[in-house]
Image: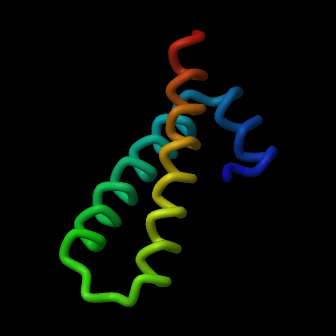
Amino acid sequence: MIDDYTIEQCKKDKEIRELKIKNLEYAIQQSQVLIAESTMDSAALTFLRRKVADSMQDLELLYLMKNQE
């Protein structure tokens, strides 16, 4: 989850928000590739999938901020 300070900074500065969006998009994409090609145990895959889901929620929040402007 995005912390309160980061949310406030994203509200104040479009450049910070855009950078955060790009970073999350890249992290999600790379994590999904890792999951697809993975030979990790199920506990590690579950943890990674949970982190991807959290990141997707953060990304949706940032998209909402962007669209409200």
Where's residue 37, x and y in %?
Answer: 19, 76
Q: Is residue 59 above or below residue 2?
A: above
Query: Which of the image's four quarters has the C terminus?
Result: top right
Q: Is residue 28 above or below residue 17?
A: below
Q: Is residue 52 left or right of residue 37?
A: right
Q: Is residue 58 above or below residue 51?
A: above
- Residue closest to the far top: 69
| Figure quadrant of residue 68 | top right
- Decide which of 19, 61 is in the foreground and name it: 61
Where's residue 35, x and y in %?
Answer: 29, 71
- Residue closest to the far front: 42
Where's residue 39, x and y in %?
Answer: 25, 88
| Figure quadrant of residue 41 | bottom left
Residue drawn at (45%, 64%) of the image: 49
Q: Is residue 12 above or below residue 42?
A: above
Where's residue 17, x and y in %?
Answer: 55, 36
Q: Is residue 27 left or right of residue 66?
A: left
- Residue closest to the far right: 4
- Decide which of 17, 26 is in the foreground and name it: 26
